[in-house]
Image (cartoon, helix red, strand yellow):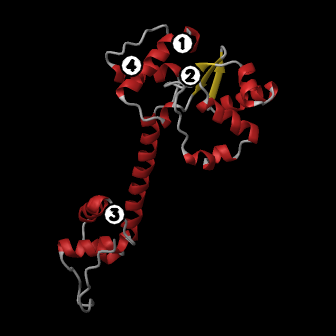
Amino acid sequence: MSKLRSVNTQFWSDPWVEELSADEKLIYLYFITNEKTNMLGVYELSIRKISFETGIKKETIVKALKGFETINKVKYTKNFIVLLNFAKHQNYNPNMKKSAIDVYNKLPNELKDSNEHIDKLDYVKGFERVLKGLGMVRKVEVETKVETKVEDKNKETKKQVYKSFDHKLKENYSKEAIDNILESIENFNNNKKYKSLLITARNWLKREHGQKSDSKTKGNEHLNMTF
């Protein structure tokens, strides 16, 4: 029975893919689309069959596999292909996770970190155990890394903005007041983009805490929501 496999159009613009040779691109694309590909991205496949179906020489395939394994893209052992990043590109529903567990339980023990049989009753934990047992990258791990980078960047931005406030403004507003305003701006309207965090912070501080100026300040500044 044939299966439908979708390939993201961004596959061809992936920086790693762009650096591959024509043969390597075809080999990797074949790994994620051939008829043996399953819910887990782990299946038995001989070099001979790969060569027959792609028309690529065996020695070229072996060389490509070694290169893929070096950068943790594909592992080839005991005639089994293990697509190490397969899971992170999938949106698994409960039935798909259960199917992946079935695939795992049928694999040779040599491919797994233990002879443990994974129960589908608690398929969420079971699926996590499957990915760990094969050394595969989870989608949540990738998302967490991205979120952490964004969070770190936001923290650094806050530090830079606080440092950039002139001496007079620091005297008029406490660090706590400034931090609270920055937090409010960050959460405002689902993080809608603003032109200048510094200008927006200045205006919000004046709106929340009033204009605290000395006699040298002339006129009134207009509230500018620079989003």
Q: Mark 4 points at which residue?
A: 126
Q: Mark 1 points at which residue?
A: 107
**Disc 1 + disc 2, Cβ < 8 Å:** yes
Could you tell me which secondary element the residue under label 3 belongs to?
A: loop
Which callout, 2 or 4, points at the residue further toward the start of the chain? 2
* Mark 1 → mark 2, Cα distance in angstroms: 9 Å
Crowd band around label 1 with a 10 angstrom C-alpha radius: few (<14), some (14–19), many (20+): some
**Disc 4 + disc 3, Cβ < 8 Å:** no
Residue found 67% across the figure and 32% down from its top: 68
Which callout, 4 or 1, points at the residue further toward the start of the chain? 1
Q: Mark 2 points at which residue?
A: 42
Of badges 4 and 1, nearer the viewer stands 1
Dividing the image into 4 quarters, which one contains the C terminus?
bottom left
Residue found 26% across the figure and 64% down from its top: 181
Of badges 3 and 2, nearer the viewer stands 2
Of badges 3 and 1, nearer the viewer stands 1
